[in-house]
Amino acid sequence: MPDGETERYDDLPVQYRGNVDVVDAPYDRKIGEKPAFDDAEIADIIAFLGTLTDGYQPAPATP
């Protein structure tokens, strides 16, 4: 941005940026605060997400 500020949530389409919950963790952090999750908690979340599978296999791409 021209004024040097960072545009928050710029990885989301503009129409959805207002939907980000900035009241609850992890998006409630203020500048200078420690992250909402430590490395061990992040690893736990990733491990949990790895268990969420229903066996879905996408069809191979056709040329």
Image: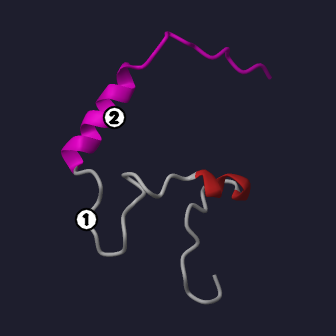
Q: Residue at x 36, y 64 (%)?
A: 29
Q: Give the residue type at disc 1.
A: Lys
Residue furthest to the front = 23
Q: Residue 20 in the image: x percent, y percent?
A: 55, 53
> On the image, numbered disc 2 is attached to which residue?
46
Q: Is residue 52 above or below residue 11?
A: above
Sequence-first tag of 1 and 2: 1
Residue furthest to the left = 40
Q: Residue at x 28, y 69 (%)?
A: 33
Q: Residues within 10 Å of mark 1 (few under 14, many from 20)?
A: few
Q: Residue 31 in the image: x percent, y percent?
A: 36, 74
Q: Quadrant of residue 18?
A: bottom right
Q: Residue 42 in the image: x percent, y percent?
A: 28, 43
Q: Measure the alpha-carbon separation of dots 1 and 2.
A: 20 Å
Residue furthest to the top = 55
- Could you tell me which secondary element the residue under label 2 belongs to? helix
Q: Is residue 13 above or below residue 44?
A: below
Q: Which residues are magenta?
A: 39-63
Specify whether 52 is left or right of 58: left
Q: Give the residue type at disc 2.
A: Ile
The quarter of the image holding the C terminus is top right
